[in-house]
Amino acid sequence: MNHLITLRDWTKEQIDEVIDLAVKIKKSPENFYDTMHRKVLVMIFEKPSLRTRVSFETGMCRMGGHAIYYDMANSPLGAGKETIHDTAKTLSRYSDLIMARLFAHKNIEEMARYADIPVINGLTDFNHPCQVLSDLMTIREKKGEIKGLTLAYLGDAKNNVTHSLLYGCSKMGVNINVGCPEGEDFSPLQGVLDDCNPICDKSGAVVKLTHDPLEAVKGADIIYTDSWMSYHVPSEELENRVKALKPFQVDVIKMQLGAPDVIFMNCLPAMRGYEQTSEVIDGPHSVVFDQAENRLHCQKAIMVKLLEGFTSDA
């Protein structure tokens, strides 16, 4: 059974297949109008969403399928009255695909373990693979090639996007500089960094962790940032987090230290004046809305590949 739980479990070849298909879908969407004819996607949401919900739901609709939105706040699963095992088994009898956006990563792993249909991780506290697949698509779209580029990530690096970027970049031969404040509260999980070592040995990529934001962005082809106030962060922590993370704000000076054709990325939502300045996100190097659009094309490709199968197995 094919699932998308974390990019750690996917091969470079599988990532390439999804990106190749996403590019084809974007170029000629009419060729895929009936690809999901009579297929049903169940979307389980424990965390709020804009891009994830709309891109998956629109993707199914435009390929001739149907998507069902299922809010855990109003469900037996969310109320603790039904197990993940029973939910996964039941939904496998009703639908063709499950996409779940959950808090705990162990829950998406359990759902995949018991489901008889493909399960897609729409985001957990550990990983956000759908986002990074579309990021890699955007990078290839803008740069032509992926391997050998350098991506600099600045900000809070103990989050799902950074972990998925580490896996994705390592698999695809993209060097990644992670610039973040000192301390485990802002640093990627050591287990993820350890996972990436043998992957980089194979791909030739280099992972670098630094607490100097200027060092991180120097010569970078891509500068990437994410929210300082993720959904799980209490609002009362805002002042302390801004103080710690302000040196890692992406501003014009840091963009100028990148390569001449550097691009700026943010997976959104973005807070202007926090993780990046308005001049950067609304500036000529920003590709954030192309990045957001590519979520749609990539979600389509993910669903098609999980149902049709890959040329190469993980």
Image (spheres, rainbow, N blue to C red):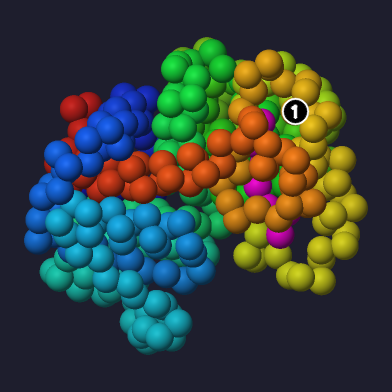
Percent from the top left, x then y, of residue 167?
Answer: 51, 33
Instruction: Answer yes or no: is residue 156 visible.
Output: yes
Q: What amino acid is at disc 1?
A: Met
Give left or right: position of 251 versus 227.
right
Percent from the top left, x then y, of residue 138?
Answer: 46, 32
The number of numbered badges drawn on the structure is: 1
* Vertical comparison of 90 with 299: above or below: below
Give left or right: position of 99 versus 217.
left
- Give neighbour class at mark 1: few <14, some 14-19, many 20+ (Cα, 10 Å): many
The residue singled out by tag 1 in the image is 255
* Front-most of residues 140 and 168: 140
What residue is shown at x 44% (from left), y 17% (from top)? 144
What residue is shown at x 9% (from left), y 61% (from top)? 38
* Vertical comparison of 116 with 128: above or below: below
Residue 225 is inside the magenta segment: yes
What residue is shown at x 40% (from left), y 86% (from top)? 74
Give left or right: position of 111 versus 52.
left
Residue 17 is inside the magenta segment: no
Give left or right: position of 114 versus 278.
left
Q: Quadrant of the C terminus?
A: top left
SS at badge 1: helix
Residues drawn in magenta: 223-229
What residue is shown at x 21% (from left), y 70% (from top)? 91
